[in-house]
Amino acid sequence: MYMPEEVNLSTFQDFEDAAKENGTTSWDAYVLMRKLGYESYTSFSGVINKAIASCAQLGIQIHDAFVPSNTIIDGKDVPSYKLSRFACFLTSMHADDKKREVAAAKVYFAAIASSLIEKAIADDDLQRLEVRDEIRSGEKLLSGVAKDAGINVNGYAFFKDAGIRGMYNMSLKELVLRKGIPEGTLYDFMGTTELAGNYFRITQTKERIRSKGIRGQAALEATAKDIGKSVRKTMIENSGVAPERLPISEDLNRVKKRLKIANRGMKKLDKSKPKQLKAISAVPPTPEDVN
């Protein structure tokens, strides 16, 4: 990743000057698009959609951060968004960091966020939240498929445990003890790699049950364990690390709280700028502000 030697207020002065203050400070999506080095709004809109999804996952009102609007481009009235500073931050975190402009923007916005909450926010925070949300949806779908295939309410816990046993070579209870985390919070303490492995396990278990027409408690448990073993083997082959040995990460509930605080802080910041922004820009950002 490109890492600017110095990113401060002057580097982004044109961006700051482009803010519209019609009661609420905001930036047109096309302004941010150009600042991040994108030429096509078609491709950039995909980045915005990911940022909107992150906003929803945090429980932040989407229309407070991403307000649908119109703007004039080449003489034409086209759909756009009015973005809050936090929306600009989320969008930059989802953008292509192979672009020099994106890497610089990530440092800039992350430095502002870090100054407000006194701790760095990383790309991985958003990725973990996204995959955790996908797991939540995946488990609901798997539960429905398993129920249709003959598992009752009392049997589902054994079915779920079978998948864990396959992937981790131990029961869910043993895994929680090994990780040293509270019961019922396993996924909230997983890093991106481990979360992704579990999401793959869940989705592939669902697909195997459907495609093979598997039915009955014993057959379903065997399938869950078999898929878990397959995922375990792949993870070990790729990284050399068994999934149970992967380190725990910060509780995702704390990550959410930190991001919400950053959102509130940015709102307050825009009421008192540019004085506070100049103070923030005087502190050179570090790689931890991005990574």
Image (cartoon, rainbow, N blue to C red):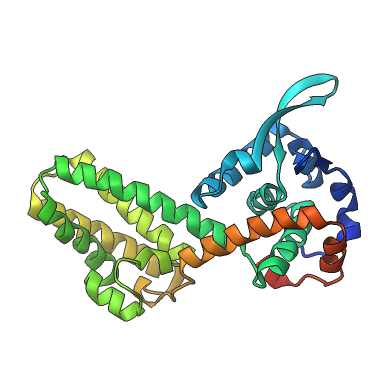
Q: Classify the position of the C terminus by image quarter.
A: bottom right
Q: Which residue is at 52% across, 60% downward?
A: 256
Q: Position of residue 174 (x, y in %)?
A: 24, 76
Left or right: where does residue 194 sit relative to residue 147?
Answer: right
Q: In which quarter of the image is residue 42?
A: top right
> Is residue 206 visible in the rendered structure shown here?
yes
- Vertical relation: 109 (above or below) 96: below
Q: Which residue is at 41% across, 65% downward?
A: 188
> Is residue 6 visible in the rendered structure shown here?
no
- Judging depth in this view, the residue of 3 and 255 nearest the camera is 255
Q: Position of residue 195 (x, y in %)?
A: 41, 61
Q: Quadrant of residue 113?
A: bottom right
Total marks placed: 0
Left or right: where does residue 34 sit relative to residue 230?
Answer: right
Q: Position of residue 220 (x, y in %)?
A: 14, 52
Q: Position of residue 238 (x, y in %)?
A: 44, 66
Q: Which residue is at 64% across, 60% downward?
A: 262
- Vertical relation: 60 (above or below) 196: above
- Judging depth in this view, the residue of 231 and 274 nearest the camera is 274
- Judging depth in this view, the residue of 240 and 126 nearest the camera is 126
- Judging depth in this view, the residue of 75 and 16 nearest the camera is 16
Q: Classify the position of the N terminus by image quarter.
A: bottom right
Left or right: where does residue 184 sit relative to residue 245?
Answer: left
- Vertical relation: 80 (above or below) 152: above
Q: Which residue is at 82% across, 25% downward?
A: 73
